[in-house]
Amino acid sequence: MHQNYHFLQHLSRRLKTELIGKEIVTCFSQNKDELVIGFADESKEFYIRAGLTAHFSALSFPDDYKRARANSVNLFKQMIGQKVLDVVQHLNERSFYLQLTDEMLLLFKLFGNRSNIVLYQHGEPLHLFHKKFAADAELNPLHMDRPLPQNFAAFEAADGNLRKLYPTFGELPTDYLEQQNYSSATLEEKWELVQQVLEQLDNPDAYYIIRYKGKLRLSLLQLGEVVYSYPDPLEALNNYTRLYLSETGFSQQYEQAKQQLTKKLNGSQTVLEQATQQLQEMRRNCSYSQSADILMANLTNIPPQAQEVELYDFYTDQQRTFKLKRNETPQKQAEKLYRKAKNQHLEIQQLEEKAERKMEEIILLESALQALAEVDNYKQLKIYLRDHTNLLSSKQQAQQQSPFRVFETEGYKILVGKSSQNNDELTQRHTYKEDMWLHAKDVSGSHVVIKHQAGKTIPTTVLEKAAQLAAWYSKRKQDSLCPVIYTPKKWVRKAKGAPAGSVIVEREKILLVKPENPFEKRK
C-alpha cells in the first residue's frame, strides 16, 4: 500500500510541509534505478531518494546522503536552483508533482514496476529518468486527475462492485472489507462499510507496517500482524522501505543472483564436458601424422592403384587396414594426411584453450556461489552484487576478468594468480579457509591455491606440483631449487593498507622444489 492512492494523499500533504519554499540543490544518480534529489533552505536540508527498480519501487527520505566520489552522475540539471511552490496530489491516481519556479513541474509517477520521474517546463517534457518508458513523455501532469462517481446512486448502479467504483482501494482495503463480511451484506450495509473504510483511510489512527499473507506491507488499516506503527507517513515509508529491502528485496535479489550464477555455471560445465570429450576422442583415434608415417614407410609394399591395403602399424605393433584412392599415389595421400595432422594439432590446441577458459569460469562461478552463500543481509548483498558485476553480466567479461590460471591434476584444481592485483582477488575472494595456499619464500610471485576437497587430504604429488608452479611464477624462476611456503588459507591475512598482493602468513611449512611448470610436459 506504499504506492496506494490513499497513502500517497497523506504523503504528498506531508511533503508539502517539508518542501514548499525549499530550493533544489542537487539531483544525481549513483546506483542503477536510483535518483536522489536534495532540497534546502536557510535552516534545513531534505532528501528524496527514489528507488525505481523493476522488482520494487519506493520513495524514502534519508536525513543525510553522502554522495560517492565516483560513479555518480548529475541529472535533471535544469531544475537545480528552482524552488518548490507546491506539492499537488492527483485525484484517484498514484502520482503527484512538485510545482517549481520557472514554470517547471517534477512528476512522480508511482505505478509499481513502471514507476518514473519526469521533469517538465512550459508543459513540455525535458527529461525522463527511465527512458525505457518513452510513453511517459506524453503524460500531462496538469490533466492526470481521475474523477470517479462515488455516490450511492453510482454504488447502487454498480451493485456494490468495488473494482468499478473504488479501483484505488487495491488489495488491503478490499480484504479488510471482506473480513467485515462485505460479500454477504445487503447493498445498504455494503455502502455503510465502504464509508467506514474511507473514513479510516482518510484519517488513519497510525501508519502501519504489517505482515500479511507472508509479506511485509505498509497499511492504513490494521490487518494481519502489525509489526510497527508510526504517527508520520514519512517515517513509516522510510522504515518500510528499509525493512522491505533488507527482507523481501534481499530474498528476491539473492535468488536472482543465485539463479543467474547457477545457470552460467551449468552452461560452462556443459561446454567443458563437450570439449573434454572431443579431446579424448581425437587423442584416442590414430593421428593423421601416424597414418602418413606408416604409408611412407611402406611405399614399396603398396601395389599400384590399390584401393585397400593391410600394412604393419609400428606404433601399435599390429596389422592395420588402409583405404586408398586409385587415382592418387601413396605419397600424395601421405602429404594430405600430414596437412590434416597440422590442422588436427591446431584443433586440439583450440579445444585445450577452450577447456582451460571454461575451467577458469567454473572456478570463478563456484567461488562466487560459495561467497553468495555467506551473504545474509541486504547490506552485504549490495556489496556482493557490486563486487561480482562482471560475473552477473556477459560471459566475455567474466573471461576477461579471470584473475588466475587453472591447472588440474588427480582431481584437484590448482589456481595461480596472474598479477599482484589478481593475487589479491584470488586470495581474498576466491579462496576459502580450508584451501591450501602457497607462495615462493621471500620473493614476489604468484599466489597459488589448491582447492580443498571435503574429507580428503591433498596428496604429496599434488602439493609438489603446486609448489613447482609457485616457484615457476616467481622471481626464483631461474634458481635450481626454490623454497615454497604453504599453509591453509585461514592462516593468511591481508593487513589494512598493505600493497596489492602483500599478505601476512602464519604457521607455514616449507617445501623445496625445482621451479618448473609440470603441466607443460603434457602438451
Image (cartoon, rainbow, N blue to C red):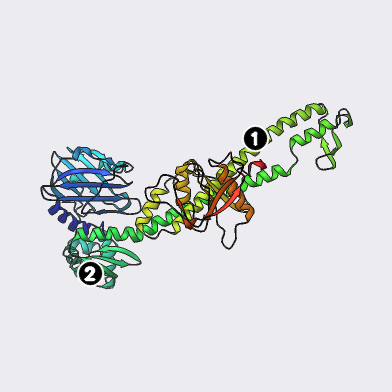
Q: Mark 2 packing: few (<14 Cα in 10 Å), some, or many (20+)?
A: many
Residue with the mark numbered 2: 190
* Residue 436 in view here: no
* Residue 378 relative to residue 22: left or right: right
**In terms of depth relative to the viewer, which is nearer, 312 or 491?**
491
Residue 122 lies in quadrant: top left
Q: Residue at x 18, y 40 (%)?
A: 80
Residue 444 in the image: above or below residue 505: above
- Tag on residue 234? none
Residue 3 image point, x, y percent? 26, 56
- Residue 323 spot, x, y in % from top left: 81, 35
| Position of 175 relative to 292 (above/below) | below
Q: Could you tell which of marks 1 and 2 lies nearer the N-terminus?
A: 2
Q: Amino acid at mark 1?
A: Leu
Q: Give SS at disc 1.
A: helix
Residue at 21% over, 48% down: 144
Numbered marks: total: 2
Q: Position of residue 68 (x, y in %)?
A: 29, 45
Left or right: residue 347 versus residue 387 is: right
Report the mark closest to the observer, 1 or 2: 1
Residue 6 is situated, as x and y percent measured from the top left of the image, at: 21, 59
Amino acid at the residue labelled 2 = Lys
Instruction: Answer with left or right where residue 249 lies relative to residue 420.
Output: left
Left or right of residue 397: residue 161: left
Quadrant including the C terminus: top right
Between 78 and 516, the residue placed more toward the observer is 516
Q: Is residue 210 above or below residue 330?
A: below
Q: Quadrant of residue 9?
A: bottom left
